[in-house]
Every structure is written in structure tokens, then in C-alpha cells.
Image (cartoon, helix red, strand yellow):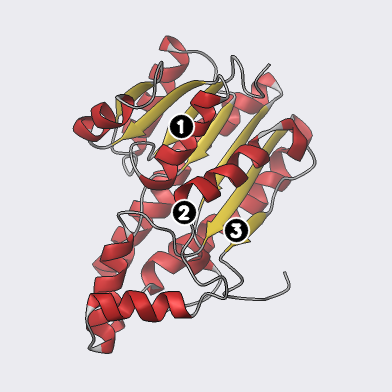
């Protein structure tokens, strides 16, 4: 039997990139998968390659919309066994272009788009005495980058929330873990490279080449590689792992944590 047979899995940001890679692998493992995205068109495109999966459109930076998504899923699909939070990514910007509004938008895009779903889901899981949440966060929350200060701050806040909630809910039978991917080959890479290029006065292609040159493994991660880790952390094989965040950045930042 597949590891996640009959399990109900909600994947926010599941229509593209890492979220979609996770959705594919959970479907292969027999899970009942639901993806969410702000765009119904993106959901429809993703569902064309996810047999048996479902999708709901929602803007998760809105706490009411996020709560409605959770309620709708629990009523129409079933109790959520696994939540993979991959929604939202803060825009990158050279530091001289930052404004208070930009910082606030970064928190909405990443921190609150995650917490607005995690909050109701973790409480439901605690009442049932079981459940796993994996937050896809980002290495920018550990190492400050001039072009990712606002988004990195949101990531750092999410790492702390993951650690704290892991501690608070461990006795309730709920695990919550973070994953910090480094540079990953997704559609969001181009935006980051453009901001880096403006800051350094070089082309986006040169910015990407420079970024990859700093990764000891010599390449960016593939979304599927991140998904492999996510599935492990969500499985029973990781039953003693909670309240921590795992970094996978190709050894770019060799630090002890």
C-alpha cells in the first residue's frame, strides 16, 4: 500500500513550482489531494496532470478567504491529514527601492498567506489528535540578502512560528516542520534574478550565472527534489521530527544550527 493512501492532503500554492511537484508525488502515493491557488486558470492547468485531485481558488493573504478554504475542504473532501504550505512568495527588491508598504506586502505574501491557513488547520488537527504540517519557507530567512530583505524577514518570522507551534502542539499529536529550499528551478527564479541584476548593474542571465556559481553542488535544486523531502517529513518515517526547519541549499551556507 502507498504511504499516503486515503490521506487527505491540502497543498497551498499547489498549481506551480514546488507545490505542484509535491502534489504530483502525493497523488502517486494514493493521497486525496486538493490544491489551492489564487488563479482558477492555474488550478485548471495543474489538475490536467493530477488525476483525481481537486482544486479551490482562494487569496490566502485574506484570513477570511483562507478560513473558508479550510472549511470548504473539510466539508467537501474530508478532514485534513496533511497540510503543505507552499503559497506565496514575497517580491524581491534592491534595498533602495524598499518602502514600508513593500515590507508589509512581503509579510502578507508569505507569512500571512501561510499562517492564515496553518492557524485553523492546526487547531482542527489538534482536536483530532493527529496531523502533519510542512511549511515551504526559504533559505532567505536564515541568511540576509540585500535583494530579499523584506521577504527574508517574512521567512524568518515563519521559521520562528514553525518552531513555536511545533513545541506548542507536540503533545496534541500534531507535527509541524519547515523546509528551506535554496535557489530552485521554478518560475519565481526569474523575478529574483531581475532584482539582483538591477542591484548589481548586470544582466539577469549574468545574475543567474553568478548565483549558481555560489552553490557548491553547481546547480539549482529541482522542485521534485524538494518534494522528495516534503513527502518524507510528512510520512510516518519522520514521526519524531517536529518544530524544526530543514535547509536544503546545496551546501551554499555551511552553518551549524
Return the residue nearer the eye: 205 or 37.
205
Identity of the residue drawn at 70% across and 38% down: 169
Among all residues in the image, which is located at the extreme top?
Answer: 76
Identity of the residue drawn at 67% across and 24% down: 3
| Residue position marked by numbered label 3 in the rendering | 160
Q: Quadrant of the C terminus?
A: bottom right
Total numbered badges shown on the rendered structure: 3
Say which of marks 1 and 3 sits in front.
1
Q: Is residue 165 left or right of residue 194?
A: right
Is residue 99 depicted above or below 77 in this figure?
below
Q: Quadrant of the N terminus?
A: top right
Q: Quadrant of the rendered structure where residue 207 is? A: bottom left
Q: Are marks 1 and 3 in contact (CB under 8 Å)?
A: no
Among all residues in the image, which is located at the extreme left?
Answer: 41
Dot placed on the residue nearer the N-terminal end, 1 or 3: 1
Give the Cα separation between the discs numbered 1 and 3.
Answer: 29 Å
Q: Are marks 2 and 1 in contact (CB under 8 Å)?
A: no
| Residue position marked by numbered label 2 in the rendering | 222
Quick one: SS at disc 2? Answer: loop
| Residue position marked by numbered label 1 in the rendering | 24
Crowdedness of circle 2 by 10 Å Cα count: few (<14), some, many (20+)? some
Give the Cα separation between the discs numbered 3 and 2.
Answer: 26 Å
Amino acid at each position: 500500500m502507498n504511504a499516503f493512501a486515503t490521506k487527505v492532503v491540502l497543498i497551498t500554492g499547489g498549481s506551480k513550482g514546488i507545490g505542484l511537484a509535491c502534489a504530483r508525488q502525493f497523488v502517486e502515493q494514493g493521497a486525496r489531494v486538493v490544491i489551492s491557488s489564487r488563479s482558477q486558470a492555474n488550478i485548471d492547468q495543474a489538475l490536467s496532470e493530477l488525476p483525481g485531485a481537486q482544486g479551490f481558488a482562494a487569496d490566502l493573504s485574506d484570513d477570511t478567504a483562507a478560513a473558508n478554504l479550510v472549511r470548504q475542504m473539510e466539508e467537501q473532501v474530508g478532514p485534513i491529514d496533511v497540510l503543505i504550505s507552499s503559497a506565496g512568495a514575497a517580491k524581491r527588491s534592491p534595498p533602495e527601492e524598499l518602502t514600508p508598504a513593500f515590507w508589509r506586502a512581503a509579510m502578507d505574501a508569505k507569512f500571512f498567506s501561510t499562517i492564515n491557513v496553518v492557524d485553523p488547520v492546526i487547531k482542527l488537527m489538534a482536536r483530532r489528535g493527529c496531523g502533519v504540517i510542512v511549511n515551504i519557507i526559504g533559505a532567505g530567512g536564515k541568511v540576509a540578502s540585500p535583494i530579499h530583505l523584506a521577504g527574508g524577514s517574512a521567512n524568518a518570522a515563519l521559521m520562528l512560528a514553525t518552531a513555536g507551534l511545533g513545541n506548542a502542539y507536540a503533545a496534541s499529536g500534531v507535527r509541524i516542520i519547515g523546509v528551506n529550499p535554496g535557489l530552485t528551478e521554478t518560475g519565481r527564479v526569474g523575478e529574483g534574478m531581475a532584482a539582483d541584476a538591477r542591484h548589481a548593474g548586470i544582466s539577469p542571465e549574468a545574475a543567474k550565472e553568478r548565483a549558481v556559481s555560489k552553490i557548491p553542488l553547481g546547480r539549482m535544486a529541482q522542485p521534485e527534489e524538494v518534494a522528495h523531502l516534503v513527502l518524507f517529513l510528512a510520512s510516518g518515517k519522520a514521526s519524531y521530527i517536529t518544530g524544526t526547519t530543514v535547509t536544503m541549499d546545496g551546501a551554499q551556507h555551511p552553518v551549524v544550527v
